[in-house]
Amino acid sequence: MEQKNIDFFWEEVAGIPKVKELCDILQSIPINWVGNKKRMLNKLMSFIERNVGSYDSFFDAFAGSGVVSMAATASSKRVVSNDALMLSTVWIKNILSGIPQPLSPEEVLFLTKFADSKDGDGGVGFIANLYNGSVLSKDEVSFINAYRKGVQVLFGNTMSIGKRNNNGVLSAAYLELDTGNVVFDKGFGNPEKASYAMNVMCVHILQQAFMGGRCYKSQLLAISEKRMQDEGRSSIIDNSLRLLKHLNQRENPVIKLSSFISRTLRPVDVLNMDAELALQMYPPTDVLYIDPPYGGYNSDYAWMYRVCEEFLTGRLLEESEELREITVKFKGEDFERDKAFRAKPRKSYQENFAALLKSSVNFPSWIISFNESSFSSINDIIDIVSSFRPNILVESIDGYRYNYRDNDKKTGSEYMIFAK
């Protein structure tokens, strides 16, 4: 087994300079996502290009932060980006749309003033009682509640959320802000601008209150009391000057990324679905990228980002049974965190992973990310993959490469798997 220096391939791989430029932009944006692949993005895209060769289309099954979808788009691939979280979907959709600035200065000012009024029923008042002032203060809840109402006043009651299953057909879907229901009728107003505006508030929340990986009561947001002590009023969410900055074209990370993406934009589909169902319904692409959650509490992204998820949907996470069933697939059997989520027989992580691969048999090339600190060892995950495909190559993020069964000297904890 030989060690490969993956960075050596930068200049030899088509499209890599654009990926490097994307990495520079991502590093400059102060938003962190759990499981974010931005630190290994260059090596991942190089690994794909070297092993797959020439390809045109790319399916990102667990898109999350969307950085891999962005890199594929920047490399001029036709991209399909899927995630079950509403938070991920609206973030990715607004970036990959390539729309540089969907809000006018007048609309920005209106939303900022409406939020600052802390008035109106925007559908998320329940968050105040849910967190009892711990994660968000009552003023902060009133702020985001009024903002949400302002979005409805300006742009109507529906926001665009990508495509979903509509009786066996993938159709453009919309979320009703007053009910939290998903519909396939856009209604009146401007659902695209509503989606963008709602996304910006999530950006604002995460930039103002993200804990950097530590959890408080399963949340990735710093408690309001700690934020007041550590940063004063600069880190509170009901800070209209900071919100105005995030809505501003020059400062907004969505604008920075979408402006870059628009230079190489090709048709993009963004799906808001269970990955297994999405792979069954969507026509196969040349490359399928799978980066599944790694199991346990730290894989329960719906719970960790629930403030943003509930802000978007206007619905308690415990009431969103469809999402909870999707996210529990790769969480494990521990329901202590979610006592309201009734226990019933479910498949194991390994069974769900195998079912996912079974739904992907018509995709010619699989690229799988796997971290050995997750639910099992690299050998176990390769055993599952090899039950579907015999041609497997594995490389650690440090550049160690080995073929399946020739892995006695393997090293590293983050792996990239190629199967065809």
Image (cartoon, helix red, strand yellow):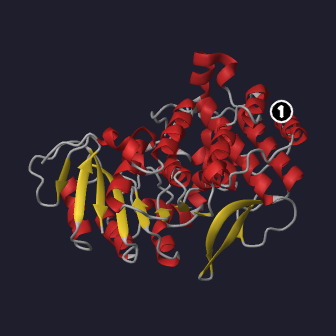
Q: Up-down: is 218 above or below 242?
A: below
For the residue pair 346 and 78, the one nearer the viewer reads as 78
Residue 268: give x, y in percent of width and height: 61, 62
Q: Residue at x 71, y 42 (%)?
A: 200
For the residue pair 368 and 189, the one nearer the viewer reads as 368
Residue carrying label 1: 116
Residue 119: give x, y in percent of width and height: 86, 40
Q: Residue at x 85, y 54 (%)?
A: 155
For the residue pair 304 and 82, the one nearer the viewer reads as 82
Q: Which quarter of the rendered picture does the C terminus lie within?
A: bottom left
Q: Up-down: is 16 above or below 356?
A: above
Q: What is the residue that sits farthest to the front in this orientation?
A: 12
**Quarter holding residue 170:** bottom right
Q: What is the residue that sits farthest to the left in this orientation?
A: 408
- Secondary structure type for disc 1: helix
Residue 413: give x, y in percent of width and height: 25, 43
The residue carrying pointer 1 sits among few (fewer than 14), some (14 to 19) or many (20 or more) residues within 10 Å by Cα, namely many
Q: Is residue 34 visible?
A: yes
